[in-house]
Image (spheres, helix red, strand yellow):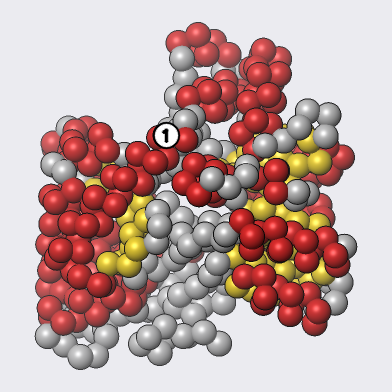
Amino acid sequence: MKKDKFGNVHTPGLPYARGELITSTQDDIAKLRNAWTVIRQRITEHGRDAFFNLTGLERSLRCESEDLDLLDDELAPALHMERLQALALDHLGGLPGKHDIAVMNRQTGALLAATLTMVDPGDTVVGVSPSYSHPCVTRAAARAGAHFVDTVGSNELERALAQAQKVSLVVLTRLAVSYEILSIDEIRRIVGLAKQTGAKVLVDDAGGARVGPAMFDQPRALELGVDVASTGLDKYGTVGPRLGLLGGYTELVDRIRVCAVELGLEARPMLYPAVVRSLEQYSPARVRELVATTKNVASELKAILGDRVCETPVIAQLKGEDILEVAMERANISKPPIVPYEATATLAMLLLRDYGILTVHFAGLPPGTSALLIKFLPPETVARFGGPQKFAQAIDRSLHNLAHIIEDANQLRQLIFGTPLPVTQAVNV
């Protein structure tokens, strides 16, 4: 059983421990709904320019004026499907006649439909990444009735394949939740090992589909020789909407599409024009620009917090354990009153309430990490906020404010959920 540095056992299905404050996905939803209230109040009082989307994600719907009359589930695909097919195959590195594509309601929906199609109950699914598989991968395997084994790198995968029975699927994540990336040599060995055992390969390429080629000169997803790959259209160079783009061998995609339609996992066809616009505007240079801005912010934050700012080649992060530790030091306490995930959630809400900064912590339900990720920041948004130094200072001041309330359960609950504890429970932790 995995534990964090404070001895808290990780919650099943998540790479971190839940505490007594944010106990479930239901609480995560309540936290998000309160965040919407905070955003509304801030915009009402200060205007739209007082809100800063620094999640690194683009989850809006961008339509040209001529597209507005095509917000129709029959007209949109009739007029845009051919163009979408060509752009999507190019984006994923597929070949006409060999590969096909399908647009899903989310990346999670794409992975679920693909897993349910390729896995039978009782099979084994093996995940392989630079650190750990995203919870949506493990949940999809569970829904399929499969046994899931998670591995790090090709050597662990090789051992797992030798020991496991009925491995029908290997789920490869080249850019992990931790934003470490597998080398192309590792990826090729992983694909080779899977093929030797007769397992199909599904690539969870949520951000890797663009980061791999743009930042590390890696092949596009389907050029890796895999069966199926899926990416999200809300991140790292694409501009929304929040959909999943899946591609793979034609016969396999046909079957996955059927599964998706039967379960309501497919994207509404009226959104196809927006997908076309998103793919048309994509440029690898934009990915490099987002990474450069992130690095500038990381440099300013390291000047304040030192080695507690962890960096990968493309992002920076404050780990949940370090956020909690810094807050405890500033509060001059030795016993943690909350778990790291709750410390991150509180820090994220303070940044939103006091500075109008929306971080990626609010994007996942539940989040895939307990860290506060600083990633793929739009330079124009950082500049509008006041620049990298001002952003770093906002994080530092919010850490100070976290320390000020960290022992007060009522204030924590009021901040995160917008509602106080019942009177009988409104005491310090």
Residue 244: x %, y % from top left: 60, 41
The C terminus - image quarter: bottom left
Q: Position of residue 108 (x, y in %)?
A: 61, 51
Dot 1: element: helix
Query: Is residue 5 something that shows in the picture?
Result: yes
Closer-to-camera residue (424/281): 281
The percent position of residue 122, horizontal first and vertical second, equals 84, 72
At horizontal 34% and vertical 63% (from top left) the residue drawn is 311
The one nearer the camera, 211 or 426, is 211
Q: Total marks drawn? A: 1
Q: Residue at x 32, y 67 (%)?
A: 310
Relative side of 53 to 130, left or right: left
Question: 271 or 80: which is nearer to us?
Answer: 80
Relative to 307, is 329 above or below? below
Give residue 272's position: percent from left, percent from top: 61, 24
Q: Determine which residue is flagged by label 1.
A: 285
Q: Residues within 10 Å of mark 1 (few under 14, many from 20)?
A: few
What's under tag 1, amino acid-wise? Ala
At 87% from the left and 40% from the top, the residue drawn is 251
| Quarter of the image that includes the N terminus | bottom right
In the rendered view, tell whether residue 101 sits above or below residue 426: above
Does residue 44 appear in this view?
no
Horizontal side, residue 123 vs residue 392: left or right: right
Q: Is residue 189 left or right of residue 184?
A: right
Q: Classify residue 190 by image quadrant.
A: bottom right
Residue at image x 60%, y 72%? 152
